[in-house]
Amino acid sequence: MDFNFTEEQSMVRDTVASFLQDKYDFETRRKIVGSEAGWRADYWQAFAEELGILGASFSEELGGLGGGAIDNMIIMEEFGKALVIEPYLGTVVIGGGFMKHSGYAGAASVIEGIVAGTTTIAFAYAEPQGRYTWSDLKTTARKDGSGWVLNGHKAVVIGAPFASHLVVTARTGGSQREASGVSVFLVDKTLPGVVTRDYPTVDGGRASEIYFENVSIPADALIGNEGGGLPLVEKVIDEATAASLAEGVGVLRKLHEGTLDYAKQRKQFGRAIADFQVLQHRMVDMFIELEQSVSMTYMATIKLEESDAERAKAVSAAKVRIGRALKFVGQNAIQIHGGMGMTDELSIGHYFKRGTIIEGLFGSVDHHLRRYEGLSFGAAA
């Protein structure tokens, strides 16, 4: 199989890498994270206008560059290397994914806003009791005339402080955990009754607890079929998981690279610690984990277009492999750096924290191992 990128994909990678190298070094990121806003809206506009990457994964008919999941993979890996805060995953991968796969009547208009950098989206799907069961919903949408009334609580909505709109899962029928009765809505975050509590996350991002208190939304807020939204949610979450794993590969590259550089400089007993065989073996193991993660990410991304079962198996297998790699490489990077590895001034600790978040995003390693076993051997996922 040919794993070489096309000329256009290589150009996207080089363009993103060059911009981030010039504008998004570690000290700049620390200032962004520490600012009141928590992100750079002007950089987001640069992604849209100067780089054009917000449209890289959309078809030309929708105003994009004609790419797809591989373009998202390329961009997310570069974002992982620079620990980019801006909400590409929530807006382009997740928000754009719902627009592309749902047959939503307003998709062209929403995607136009995404590509232009004027529409930002956060995915409000997780609830305190739900764990990784996407159908476990207490949030409800009740019909009211031609529209809907939304009530409920969504937890840890990543990127919500930056969002203009929310993609919200809600129950329109069935019991709390039933597969049927799940619907998806696009909600303007400024609507009356949308209450947010914003806070920083351990990796430097921002998230919100969001409460919907009798929020009136129009009929055209419904994305996809009423009550039949769970397969769409699962498809988009698999795409988002694959993209987050590509970001994880970028994090792994920097963890390995930073540890190798440090080991060559740090001296003990008059020698660089990189000369000690036990640490050489450890860093080789870290490199092997990185290379395996690259291959699994490619595999998962390529299989996103296959059947639901094959897509889900590939994504879960990759999540298990890369989740374990993030833990192994991150912990060894910190150990080799010693106590200073977790200081705020050193980048390696920030990569470790981001890797830890990615490890649990959209399902833990244990969850995806059970899911893979269920898909492969017929057990309950």
Image (cartoon, helix red, strand yellow):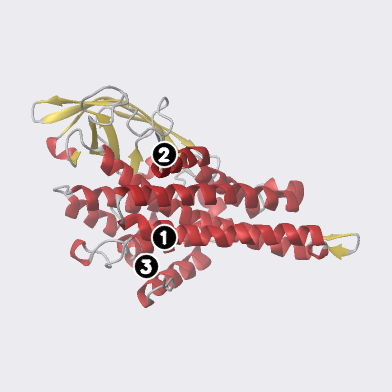
Query: Which residue is disc 1 drawn over?
Result: 73
| Label whose residue precedes the other's in the sequence (2 or 3) | 3
| Residue at 27%, 37% in the rendered image | 230
| Residue at 56%, 48% in the rendered image | 355
| Residue at 33%, 54% in the rendered image | 92
Tell me if 333 is positioned left or right of 243 in this view.
Answer: right
Q: Looking at the image, is mark 2 or mark 3 nearer the viewer?
A: 2
Percent x, y of residue 145: 8, 26
| Label whose residue precedes the other's in the sequence (1 or 2) | 1
Q: Vertical placement of 377 versus 325: above or below?
A: above
Mark 2: which amino acid? Gly
Percent x, y of residue 243: 42, 54
Q: Vertical placement of 6 versus 46: above or below?
A: below
Query: Which residue is disc 3 drawn over?
Result: 51
Tell me if 1 is positioned left or right of 262 in this view.
Answer: left
Query: Which residue is disc 2 drawn over?
Result: 374
The picture quadrant where one finds residue 60 is bottom left
